[in-house]
Image (cartoon, helix red, strand yellow):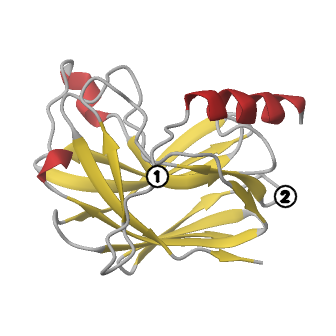
Amino acid sequence: MRIFGLFICFSCMIACNHSAKLNPENDFVEYIIQAGEQYSSNNTIRIVDSISEMKFIARFDSTAIYTSLDSINQYDIYKLYGFSDNNTMHHANSARIGWCWLHQKLQLFGYIYNDSVRSSQYIKSVALNTNIDCSIKVATNKYIFTIDGTTITMPRTATIAKGYQLFPYFGGDEVAPHLIRIWIKDNSVYK
């Protein structure tokens, strides 16, 4: 609990203070990862309490196309959206949808931590410049990831559906090679 509180304080210090840019026609928030950065704009702290399903629509444009400096990093999975779980830090317990540009396709993954052990599973490839329906359902012992009708399940060891929101992040060994834009419309369901 103390670590969670310290994380919140630290994150508030580094979180972007920009107000969210909403498109008034469809309520999408534009997240921008600047060249040379990892964190996106509009990543202010938000507690996620008693979530049953995180539902959102995402859209990537051609800025999602990149070439890693180190070719092995092309396989790295960057983070789109999700939440920490079990009232712990996200590297202990969390569920997110991840993405990478690989083999000339935008590929999406289920990306989790269970008791500090990371795993990922391919879900599907999607087109640029299209709305992508995404969902992460929380069940007793599993996460159910759905992207445009394709569903996978991954194990869940957490017992308390509580944590904090996780936003777009270009993380790993490298920083964003150029400006990356992602739009998200959140339609989450809380208990």
- Residue drawn where x is 79% and y is 28% of the image: 6
Q: Residue at x 37, y 69 (%)?
A: 28
Using the numbered discs, state the Cα–Cα distance from disc 2 to disc 1 in whole angstroms: 30 Å
Q: Residue at 52%, 77% (x, y): give it.
A: 187
Query: Which element carries disc 1, helix, strand or loop?
Result: loop
- Identified at 32% across, 70% down, the residue is 23
Q: What x and y, as percent, mark residue 143?
A: 63, 64
Q: Quadrant of the N terminus?
A: top right
Q: Secondary structure at mark 2?
A: loop
Q: Height in image: 19 above or below 22?
A: above
In this rendering, position of residue 61 left or right of residue 18? left
Q: Which residue matches tag 1?
A: 19
Whole-percent x and y of residue 19?
46, 52
Q: Nearer the viewer, mark 2 or mark 1?
A: 1
Picture coordinates of residue 175, whole percent (x, y): 31, 24
Residue 91 falls left or right of residue 60: right
Disc 2 packing (10 Å; few <14; some 14–19; many ≥20): some
Question: What is the number of callouts on the image?
Answer: 2
| Residue, disc 2 | 160
Quadrant containing the C terminus is: bottom right
Q: Nearer the viewer, residue 149 or 178?
A: 178
Q: Is residue 112 left or right of residue 115?
A: left
Outermost residue toward the right?
1
> What amino acid is labelled 2 in the image?
Ile
- Asked whether 164 or 123 is in front, the reply is 164
